[in-house]
Image (tube, rainbow, N blue to C red):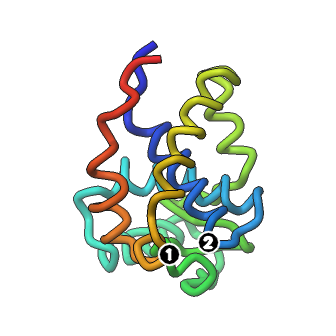
Amino acid sequence: MRINRFPKMAALQYKRALKLGFDEPHAKAIGIAEATKYAIFKNLSHKKRIAHEKEAIANKGKKEISLDDKKYEIFKLQALDGWPFVGDRIYTDKDYDRYFLKWGDDIKLKIEKWALDIVDKCDEKILKNENKFFNECWKVHRDELKEL
């Protein structure tokens, strides 16, 4: 089975969040939100993405809400109701689990083991820095595990 980059990014960010001390449900939510963030907004700057998300909320006629910039600051994600918020949507651990249903448990476990092996080799300074993590942990490994 051909494995694209999205599930690898989701698993890698999930394992990164666990190693940084987030609990299991929030780590899974971060994993799927981070993969989504990179898929949707890879060509947008962080500042422009935040403005876009706030504008999307305002345009839907919703009451003014306050997005939390601190809870997931290390991932450059905003939070709404305690969960990652990307692309006008809240992500939870259930989104991560639902996404991986299509891959099956065996493939999911292999991807997560691959991700854990990478994260275990990264020191904490790199894990805490979005750009360094992207360049030193993701870019060098993203094309591995193409087929399972």
- Residue 65's place in the image compared with 99, above or below, is below
Q: Do the residues under discs 1 and 2 have CB atoms within 8 angstroms?
A: yes
* Residue in the foreground of this view, choosing between 83 and 13: 13
Farthest residue toward the top?
Answer: 1
Q: What x and y, as percent, mark residue 103?
A: 60, 22
Residue type indicated by callout 1: Glu
For label 1, count other residues whose C-alpha is less than 10 Å away and answer few (under 14), some (14-19) or many (20+): some
For label 2, count other residues whose C-alpha is less than 10 Å away and answer few (under 14), some (14-19) or many (20+): some
- Residue 39's place in the image compared with 88, above or below, is above
* Residue in the foreground of this view, choosing between 70 and 58: 70
Judging by the rendered image, the residue that carries numbered circle 2 is: 20
- Residue 61's place in the image compared with 118, above or below, is below
**Label drawn at residue 124:** 1
Residue at 53% x, 57% y: name it.
120
Q: What x and y, as percent, mark residue 26?
A: 71, 62
Residue at 67% x, 53% y: name it.
28
